[in-house]
Amino acid sequence: MKKFQLAALAFCIPLFGADAPLPSAQTVIDHWINATGGRAAWEARHNVVEHATVDFAKQGIKGTLTVYEAAPDKYLGITELPGIGRISTGSNGEVAWENTSLQGPRIKQGAEQADAFREGAFNADLNWQKLYVKGEITGLESVEGHECYRLVLTPKQGNPVTEYYDKTSGLLVRTTTTVTSQLGEIPAEILYDDYQKDAGVLSAHRMVNRAAQQEFVIQIQSIETNVDLPKDRFDLPPEVQALVKKSVAAVTPDRGKLTVYMGGSPVAKENYSVQKLVNGGVDIDGSGSASLGPMKIDIEKFEVRTDAKLDPLEAIAKGTLGTIQMNVHTTFAGGEAKNEIDTGQGAQPKDIPVHTNAVVVNANLPLYPWTVLAMRASLDGRQPQQFPVYVLGQAEEQATVVFEGRDRVEFAGQTAELNHLAVTGTTPQGQPIRLDFWVDNRRKIIKMAVPSQGVEAYQDGFDPKAPVAVSEQQPPKG
């Protein structure tokens, strides 16, 4: 027994000397995790249910709060306040929402949505680097009588969060941030106190919240862990489901078909759609097939999902090159593309540094993922524009894009005035390459050319005016 007592007492000993340099963010967070029960205790939890009271003392209002959380990203909070009614908030990794008795349902967007997704991440402290692009200890500060390390966490989207951890105990004392809400940007503060252990994890049971010149206290009454929750606990309420359906139905997917020619002969067909997402981003999803001599390529799926800024969130590629599988699943976070690559021998992880605003394409076919670049490039002026381009599963390269102006392009039986974008760069193998796009005013690719490879692609309804000859591969000039 004595060695266990000594182990517990160790948490009360300062880990860092007064004159020592500031520790890293990871060191401080590790101290917090250990002080609250250790990684194993946290990982043993799959869901929690918290029952609490909410007290607006100055207004004389006291209600209840019930919070449901489950791995990996499910959250539901239900507040009942006399005279105000029910306030429900939730997130499931795809939709963040709020539904109140006074204002009805709404879907959160932008920075407010990003905040909700981070708050809904289960056991977030164990994986904080997936939620923030940077964490930095910026100094020591006295908070409520505690000498604390000040940790600033910077998310990809939204405002930084500052957390204050007691230098000796490792416990979280205070959090400050600027909250994005319907009322605008609001400074907010939470003070944590009354730490108690439930199912092996120590957590604050009293939280003083200050925002918008109001103060209220949340006092946790009980915490249940690994509860047998109803399967529909985190389903969207019907009112929110209706908003989601309305949002999706309001935007008709833009569908496209490309025929790819090489050396004057059709070699590939591609079908795709560009769908607006609830989060304001887009989903480009399609398939295709190609015959390159004896080699057959089947593209079962190539999908790229983005956020509202068209920065990549996820990419999926499934296909075969002859008898060889070409399957890649990639998620983007914290300046990395985290790939799971399967060529028939089982999935292998491969992490590749990428910029958060990279354009995701394939090494060869399909060509339609270049639609994201066409959507992002400026058509105002002819100054060179720089874009990081991530070749899925391989590497990131830099591309230079120049708007060449408006071209009058001839097709079979028609002509069209199109915007001409010229893209130059190198392949991951170091070979220089140029691509030319002709896009309409909606940024839909109507024609695409890779002169060095004798490749051209035409949108359905815009056929080449004659069999494409190798000598005609140079981009037309308007």
Image: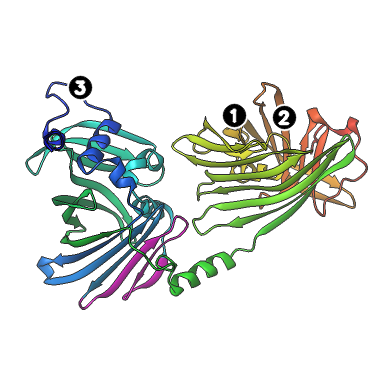
Front tag of 2 and 3: 3
Question: Dividing the image into 4 quarters, which one contains the N terminus?
Answer: top left
Mark 1 or mark 3, which has the lower sequence index? Answer: 3
Is residue 444 found left or right of 293 in the rendered image? left
Q: Relative to 298, does residue 136 appear above or below in the rendering?
A: above
Is residue 15 found left or right of 350 in the rendered image? left
Mark 2 or mark 3, which has the lower sequence index? Answer: 3
* Magenta segment: 82-106
Dot 3: element: loop
Residue furthest out toward the bottom: 83
Mark 2 and mark 3: Cα distance apart in space: 50 Å
Residue at 86% of width from left, 49% of height from top?
463
Front tag of 1 and 2: 1
Q: What residue type is labelled 3?
A: Pro
Residue 243 horizontal/vertical position (percent):
48, 70
Residue at 16% of width from left, 50% of height from top?
192
Q: What residue type is labelled 1?
A: Ala
Numbered mark located on residue 349 in the image: none
Number of disc labels: 3
Mark 1 or mark 2, which has the lower sequence index? Answer: 1
Magenta stretch: dominant SS? strand
Residue 447 horizontal/vertical position (percent):
77, 44
Dot 1: element: strand
Q: Mark 1 points at which residue?
A: 395
Residue 411 horizontal/vertical position (percent):
86, 47
Residue at 23% of width from left, 43% of height from top?
37
Q: Mark 3 points at which residue?
A: 21
The answer to which quarter of the image holds residue 33 is top left
Residues marked 1 and 3 touching at CB (< 8 Å): no
Q: Mark 2 points at which residue?
A: 434
User: Would you say residue 87 sits in the magenta stretch?
Assistant: yes
